[in-house]
Image: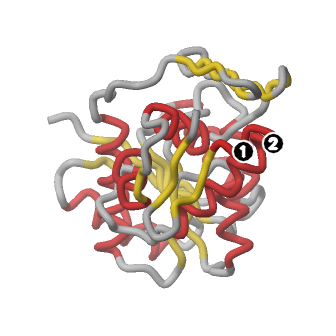
Amino acid sequence: MQKHRVLIVEDEQDIAGLIKHTLERSGNAEAEIVGSGDAALKAVTARPPDLIILDLNLPVLGGLEVCRLLRQRSDARHLPIIMLTAKSSESDRVTGLEMGADDYVTKPFSLRELTARVKAVLRRAAAPEERQAAAYTGTHLVADFDAVAVAVDGEPIKLTRREFELLRYLVQNKNRVVSRDRLLERVWGYDRLVETRSVDVHVGRLRQKLGTAGTQIETSIGLGYRFID
């Protein structure tokens, strides 16, 4: 079985070593450690990993900036990133998600939980594609999912990888209520492992970016979300 390559970007060597040991112990992962933001960018260029565990407080170049730069690169735009940091306020979590992070784990963290999240992200990336909407054309929203192009009222809009996948899944299930747990499972790849708050944050940001088309994503109180045609 081919091992998944994980890049651990962490300047605290004891923490990095512990994460590496834990991930490699299962036999399904091969982990590399770098201790700074600039080294992370070089490592991705030299040998792209399957996933990055990225600390925010790094020397030379901070984790948020690393994430932003990677999301601008064609070779790393869809590379899964799990942010790891001591910062735990909601504003920090939202900032990380807005930058394009796939998940956010705060210190101190459970190695078991981190490992489960890593497996979930990798499982999602390796899973066969479900039946997916290829395109959508509405009064305000036009989305070509194959071309990764979304426009509202004729103006292109820029979505993060997660926002794009969320929109596609909601459109794929248009006029049907999709629960938060279902979204976590199908879009995030988690089986009720993390708080559904992450879904709410992403839906809120997606609605904001969609502008006039944002009202097409309805909240079904106590149930989930529905994209109306």
Q: Where residue 199 sits: x, y (%)?
A: 53, 60
Q: Is residue 40 left or right of residue 80?
A: right
What residue does disc 1 label? 214
Q: Where residue 110 sits: x, y (%)?
A: 37, 79
| Residues tagged 2 and 1 counted as in contact (Cβ below 8 A) | yes
Give the residue type that dot 1 points to: Gly
Instruction: Determine the CA span between mark 2 and mark 1.
Output: 5 Å
In the displayed structure, would residue 67 be above or below residue 43?
below
Q: Where residue 15 sits: x, y (%)?
A: 46, 74
In the picture, the disc for residue 211 is 2
In the displayed structure, would residue 31 be above or below residue 116?
above
Considering every residue shown, the one lying at the far bottom of the view is: 108
87 and 159: which is toward the camera: 159
Residue 31 in view of the camera: no
Give the residue type that dot 2 points to: Gly
Disc 1 on helix, strand or loop?
helix
Identity of the residue drawn at 58% across and 63% down = 200
Identity of the residue drawn at 54% across and 76% down = 106
Residue 167 in view of the camera: yes
